[in-house]
Amino acid sequence: MTEEGSGMNDGDTKCVVTSAAMLELKSVHKRFGGLHAVNDISFRVEPGCIKAVIGPNGAGKTTLFNLIAGNLPVSTGTIHFQGQEIQEKKPYQIAHLGLARTFQNIKLFHGMTALECVMVGRHVQSRAGFFSGMFALPSTWKEERAIRNRSMELLELMQIADCANLEATSLAFGQQRAVEMARALAAEPKLLLLDEPAAGLNIYETAEVARLICRIRDMGITVLLVEHDMSLVMDISDEIVVLSFGKKLAEDSPTNIQKNAEVIKIYLGEDDAITA
């Protein structure tokens, strides 16, 4: 990392190192019995950045996301989100702090429309309590309309507003991905974790996802993503962390990662190179 207030190494990044990181992992470990799935991982995610985590299958990427989001307990180490320790908090508590995520395997609600799925994501922003809902007070209906309107705006952002009233699980795979991203954005996160957002998408859908992620960053939302599509990663990332067998192999800008001999050898093989 560079000195405070300056950019990354090669000058091609929008990331600026600050005194207070959006997310910071310090010596994070996760053990499953004798398996050390995440081994002494430390890195920062600066506000306003798109940071990618890459590595071969089994490198510990999704496990790392589950630790950050509170879906798995940390064995040792600390995770700070906006300066606050979160490794012992529940997922819903972390979501209330401003961290949202998507999943490698799409998780939408059966029997709900696309709009309803996105509206569920607004629950952390809702204020109506049990009694106001039970008695259908005017404030509850006002909040319901606001939630519906904001959810439609997010479907429009994802360019799938015409699917709002269709059952979410009946949509095409790429559209389901878009619904899931809209649902995560409905929570108004400060940090968005995207777990393989381009998985299963064709080249055109992947290009659209890349544009959407950049648009999300331009909305002031910091993005941390796990992704196997190297073209997408190299095109949109400000920084990249490379994992191998649960350990951090490298952390640098995309340009420098492409030149890193150890990354090329371990991640892609002796005779291959990472191409943008």
Image: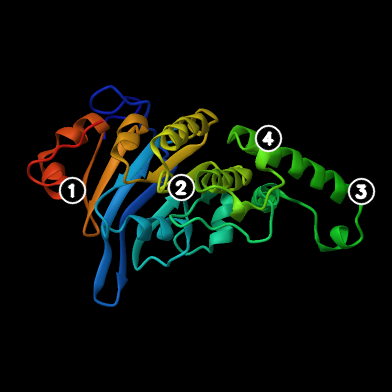
Instruction: Report which residue position mark 1 lands on.
Output: 267
* Residue 115: image location, x then y, percent: 69, 47
Instruction: Report which residue position mark 3 lands on.
Output: 138
* Mark 4 Cα shell of 10 Å, populated few (<14), some (14-19), many (≥20): some
* Residue 241: image location, x then y, percent: 28, 44
Amino acid type assigned to the residue bearing label 3 in the image: Pro
Asked if one can make out residue 82 in the rendered structure from this viewpoint, the answer is no
Could you tell which of marks 4 and 1 lies nearer the N-terminus?
4
* Residue 223: image location, x then y, percent: 45, 40
Callout in the foreground (3, 1): 1
Viewer-proximal residue among 179 and 194: 179
Could you tell which of marks 1 and 2 lies nearer the N-terminus?
2
Amino acid type assigned to the residue bearing label 1 in the image: Tyr
Relative to 44, is 35 above or below? below
Q: Horizontal placement of 109 versus 83: left or right?
A: right
Q: Check whether the beta carbons of the residues at disc 3 and disc 4 lie within 8 A of each other.
A: no
Instruction: Report which residue position mark 4 lands on.
Output: 153
Instruction: Report which residue position mark 2 lands on.
Output: 193
Q: Horizontal placement of 188 versus 44: left or right?
A: right
Task: For the N terminus, give its image quadrant.
Answer: top left
